[in-house]
Image (spheres, rainbow, N blue to C red):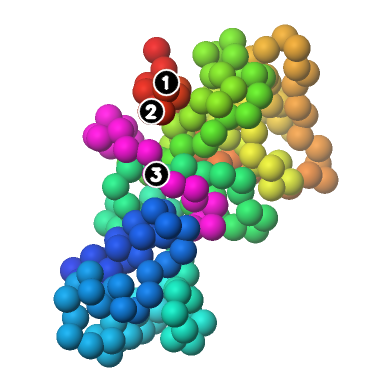
Amino acid sequence: MAEGLTERQKQILHYLLQYKSRTGFPPSFQEIAAQFQFASLTAVKDHLKALEKKGFIKKSGFKARAIEVVMQPGDPDFMPDGIPIIGRVAAGTPILAQENILGYLNFGNYFAENGNIFALKVQGDSMKDEGILDGDLVIIKHQDTARNGDIVVAIIDEEATVKTFFHEGEQIRLQPQNPKYKPIYVGENQSFRIGGKVIGVVRKSGSAYTRAS
């Protein structure tokens, strides 16, 4: 979490995340200095050293554009504006790790009360009978538990899938909501975790996403 950060350090962390989400790479020291009107690069390096010491960034020396933000999932104090859109989940990483984030979806405060949330793009029509279509973004509350009947993002062998969750005795069943598809039964030798619970769906209309009715 962002406890222990100064206000300026929070601002710099916001800037690093927002810059990366816009461009795909981190800002240079010169760009950071210009953004915050620092008189020299020494001030930039001092702030980055402090952020690294507190565990919020990693860097390769002080080379240009060698700053990696270590995301703290769901921390509202320094998440960029909007809901992070998750691509493929990299093996061994937290679901909200920076390398999994493709961009951000701005829906104002509509989902703000749910806090710790992200979006995942749906591939395929296996959940169409629940109104979740190919290409939709599902809005997910990040959690690692689920109740029977919850629609979840399940991560099996590091591949994410959206299905209805059922825990039946010692067996986990992931049920599609389309009769064309068979349920997925999680094998005892498979890696499995819950990435979160689906709390909403948004659909692309033209060039913009809108809440699906």
Task: Please provide the residue range marked out in magenta.
Answer: 97-114
Q: Quadrant of residue 90?
A: bottom right
Element on which disc 3 rests: strand
Inter-mark Cα distance, 3 to 1: 17 Å
* Residue positioned 23% across, 65% down in the render: 11
40 lies above or below 128: below
Q: Amino acid at mark 2?
A: Ala
- Residue with the mark numbered 1: 205
Q: Which residue is mark 3?
A: 104
* Image-based side of 197 in relation to 212, left or right: right
Can residue 5 be seen in the rendering of this structure? no
Could you tell me residue 153's position as x and y percent? 58, 35
Disc 3, disc 1: CB below 8 Å? Answer: no
Residue at 38%, 69% in the rendered image: 27
- Nearer-the-camera pick, 24 or 189: 24
Please name the residue shown 42% across and 21% down the image. 205
